[in-house]
Amino acid sequence: MKRKWERDLGLQGRMIFTMFLLAAVYLFFLAFLSYNGTPPVVMMLFVGSFMAIQYFYSDKLVLWSTGAHIVSESESPQLHGMITRLCAIADLPKPQVAIVRTDVPNAFATGRNQNNAVVAVTTGIMDKLSAAELEAVLAHELTHIKNRDMAVMTIASFLSTLAFYFVRYILYFGNMGGDRKKEGGGIVLIWLVSIAVWIISFILIRALSRYREYAADRGSAIITGQPSDLASALMKISGVMARVPSEDLRTVEGMNAFFIIPAISGSSIMDLFSTHPSVEKRIAKLEKMQQDMA
């Protein structure tokens, strides 16, 4: 039975406001480049092509980088059965299902839209969680697909990536030979503005990433009807993660932004720079949802 998808207006408002701030920063950056006569066409084409590849082939790139393998229903009937049932409740087309052979307990979703998506889980998470807890984690990942988070984050990061490449462009050509006396001051100014834009957009994108995790947690609670199952899963995953050998954690550290819980929580100095909210904050929100449902 499909569940009514209630909206969290407060969370949506924060996400929209963050996107608005990102747009404002990006527009200022483009206006500044235009004012200084910078020809961004070649760089725009380069970065645009790079982002298009990331957008259209994100699922293949992520599966390749994590070592995930697509599994058929005959290979993993229980996992497929869970996802089929959850998709029926969430009113979603069934994504492809993949498994990553690692003891690190985690899961992720990728794909550019609801019809081109993959949900992957590690062997570690299947061994450590109960069926109800695993379903809650899968529902969290399916919510990422339902909310089109991959497309949202790709669009949000496009001009941030452009700013980053522009910094490298200025650093490279600024050090080349030639008469730079007249242009030197302008190059330094553009370089400083590019760095400032990249830092600000980086922080805003991280904030947007944290909001989408809260939204996915909430979606999981709506789909399963049991916020406590996801809270229990998060506690188990974070507890097990602390006991996983550091070598194993480092092999998947590059996928932290995709995982339900970062493989190495200490990789972010402050919450401001983290892709995920703290586990404690997420569990507190889920516990409140459980109380409200009761």
Image (spheres, helix red, strand yellow):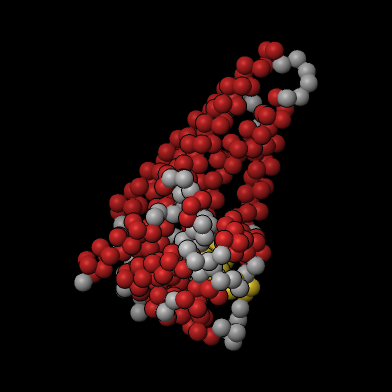
Residue 82 x, y percent position in the rendering: 46, 80
Which residue is drawn at the image coordinates 51% and 57% (left, top)?
A: 264
User: Which residue lies at the image location 44% right of the left edge and 54% below the top edge?
Assistant: 276
State the residue in front, 269 or 254.
Answer: 269
199 left or right of 57 in image: left
Q: Quadrant of the C terminus?
A: bottom left
Give the number of marks: 0
Residue placed furthest toward the right = 177
Q: Residue visible at 42% across and 52% down?
A: 210
Residue 26: tell me if it is visible: no
Using the image, determine if residue 190 lies above or below residue 133.
above
x and y percentages locating residue 54 in the rendered image: 63, 54
Quarter of the image where one finds residue 36: top right
> Residue 55, can we see it?
yes
**Residue 190 percent across, percent down from the top left:** 59, 25
> In terms of image quadrants, where is residue 220?
bottom left
Q: Where does the N terminus fall, quadrant-wise?
A: bottom left
- What x and y, as percent, mark residue 142? 46, 68
Residue at 70 percent of width and 24 percent of height: 174
Camera-nearest residue between 134 and 246: 246
Q: Is residue 175 above or below residue 289?
A: above
